[in-house]
């Protein structure tokens, strides 16, 4: 089990990667509005990579908890979960908007 400092550092890693994923996706949307499809594809690839890193951390937490409440639920943990979920939703919506711009 991770100590409190390691746990907080890992939570921050999740927040950072989720935030970066969302930022890349919104930057890709801006490029789609301009028709810069090469940048769009690259940025969406980076968004997915960052999302995968965040998801790996989330999966690690799920494994550590084992569905038994072994991890303390703190405000920062809830905040991290909010970040990953909103980043995933933003990326999914932005993927759809990009398709609209391509048409």
Image (cartoon, rainbow, N blue to C red):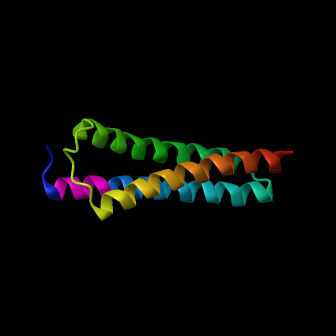
The relative height of residue 92 versus residue 29 in the rendered view (above or below) is above
What secondary structure predominates along the stretch shown in magenta?
helix
Q: Position of residue 6 (x, y in %)?
A: 18, 53
Counting from the top left corner in percent of width and height, residue 24 is at 57, 55
In-front residue for pair 86/42 = 86
80 on left or right of 101: left
Q: Quadrant of the N terminus?
A: top left
Name the residue located 27 percent from the left edge and 35 percent from the top edge: 63
Residue 89 x, y percent position in the rendering: 58, 50
- Residue 99 as seen in the image, left or right of residue 95: right
Residue depicted at 30% across the width and 55% down the height: 11
Residue toward you, 25 or 63: 63
Q: Residue furthest right?
A: 103
**Residue 75 higher or lower than 92, as above or below:** below
Identify the residue at image location x=63%, y=46%: 92
Magenta-tinted stretch: 5-11
Q: Residue furthest bottom?
A: 75
Numbered label tally: 0
The answer to whether one can see residue 37 in this image is: no
- Would you say 49 lies left or right of 6 here? right
In what quadrant of the picture does the C terminus appear? Answer: top right
Q: Is residue 21 magenta?
A: no
Residue that sits furthest to the front in the current view: 68
The quadrant in which residue 9 appears is bottom left
In the rendered image, residue 101, in percent from the top left (x then y), is placed at: 81, 51
């Amino acid at each position: 089990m991770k100590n409190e400092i390691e746990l907080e550092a890992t939570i921050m890693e999740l927040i950072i990667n989720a935030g970066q994923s969302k930022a890349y996706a919104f930057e890709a949307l801006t490029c789609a509005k301009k028709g810069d499809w090469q940048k769009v594809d690259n940025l969406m690839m980076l968004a997915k990579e960052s999302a995968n890193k965040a998801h790996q951390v989330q999966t690690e937490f799920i494994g550590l908890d084992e569905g038994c409440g072994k991890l303390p639920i703190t405000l920062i943990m809830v905040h991290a979960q909010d970040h990953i979920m909103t980043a995933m939703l933003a990326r999914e919506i932005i993927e759809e908007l990009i398709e609209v711009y391509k048409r």
